[in-house]
Image (cartoon, rainbow, N blue to C red):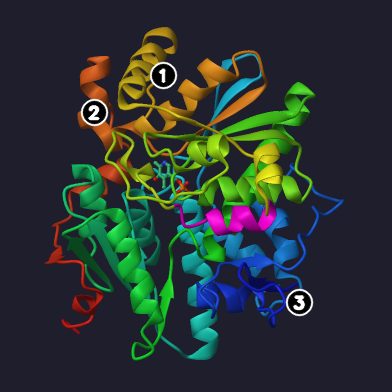
Amino acid sequence: MEFVSTRNRDENGFSASGAILKGLAPDGGLFVPKTMPTLPSDFTLSKGLWYAMYQAIKPFFEGDELEFELEEICKNAFDFPLPFFKEGDAKEIMELIYGPTSAFKDYGARFLAFTMEKLLEKRGKELTILVATSGDTGGAVASAFHGRKNLKVKVLFPKGRVADRQRAQLTSWGDNVESYEVDGSFDDCQRMVKEAFMDKSIDGLSSANSINLGRLLPQMAYYVYASLLFEAKYKTKMTLIIPSGNVGNSTGAYWAKAMGAPIAKIVLAVNANRTIPDYLESGKYEPRASVKTLANAMDVGAPSNMERLFDLFPNYGSFKENVSSFSVSDDEIKRTIKEMYDENGYILCPHTACAERVRRDHFPDEATVVVATAHPAKFNTIVEPLIGKTIAIPLNLYKIMQRPSKAIEIDCDYHKLFVQD
Ligand SMILES: *Cc1c(COP(=O)(O)O)cnc(C)c1O
């Protein structure tokens, strides 16, 4: 099994472990499988979530140095539940929100942390992880990597653009985790990380962003699990509606479908950052600066995983055939949170609300799964006034909030990340 760069499929390939350690391909592209594997024919759901995810990831590690450790890694990384809320007949919400930081990013971050720790231990090497976050990534990565051997983490987040409880999860770790509050946007943070990687004088860096293959594979794997479960239950294929920003989560879904998972359509719900819906309408792809919205983890104007979607669907025709996307305004987010609570007593986070709005407006009569990407308690200041009720805090989140907080303030110059050392 080989992984190649989106920018040159003819270059020498990397193994899964090699691609995970590198983060970005040497030419600045993103790693993709040279040929997409298919799901194992003896795939079973009978051993539960982590084992199903293991089976989906396994073909990507064929011949890899971690091939025989993969099962244990999956067992350790995916050790929390994935419940579904039934909203109606063949209408479900897939709750990826019960990990240590109450967001879907826990799956990818934990898989990556366990994988990297194993690889570094084998090599007797150390690595520094640089991660730019618009909200949930940094918390999930910090939590997953905190205290892991031979690994250091530098988390960058945009000042004033993350919720208080998100900020607590970015800044309350210490030890091998450093937090940087950047005077700029998420796109600035992301650019700084890219620049640091290009700087040949800085050694031993890797990424844990959604561009890392190790983040992506679990996001493919839970969609394999969900689609097979849905098909077994309803005898039909689900259409997936995914709250999207950097489109890492949705790229996972496209890979699952490409491997043969029973998924009808994949729909990207975005906030007021309309780069993808505009491309679908105009045929011209125009990345841009992000705008601030209530679903702040999706405030992305230049989605970094688009290169992987363009690798799957290289021209406008095939892209349009396979990708649909709808934009949801802040007013609609608020209305949907209220509506959903009044009708079902169910509390949505602002990101998940985008996907629920898309289901209600565009797919009212289809078999659909809305993906819940974060627990609403992380966005209490937005959600509580809308539903007129205090949201119970998950225990994991409460424990994190009790820890002391520390962040280093810097401007948009990536050199500043390395002066304290
Ligand atoms: C990161 C995030 C998203 C967007 O996911 P992408 O993989 O960047 O598209 C959506 N919702 C929440 C809560 C997130 O943290």
Task: State which mark lies toward you, 2 or 1.
Answer: 2
> Residue 171, located in which quarter of the rendered image?
bottom left
In the depicted view, which residue is nearer to us: 298 or 229? Answer: 298
Q: Which residue is mark 2?
A: 382
What mark, if any, has residue 346 been given in the picture? 1
What mark, if any, has residue 52 been given in the picture? none
Q: Verify whether residue 307 appears in magenta.
A: yes
What mark, if any, has residue 63 been given in the picture? 3
Q: Verify whether residue 197 appears in magenta.
A: no
Amino acid on which the number 2 mark rests in the picture: Ile
Amino acid on which the number 1 mark rests in the picture: Tyr
Amino acid on which the number 3 mark rests in the picture: Gly
List the single residue furthest toward the right.
41
**Residue 269 visible (yes or no):** yes
**Residue 146 visible (yes or no):** no
The magenta stretch is: 303-313
Label 1's element? loop
Left of 360 or right of it: where is 289?
left
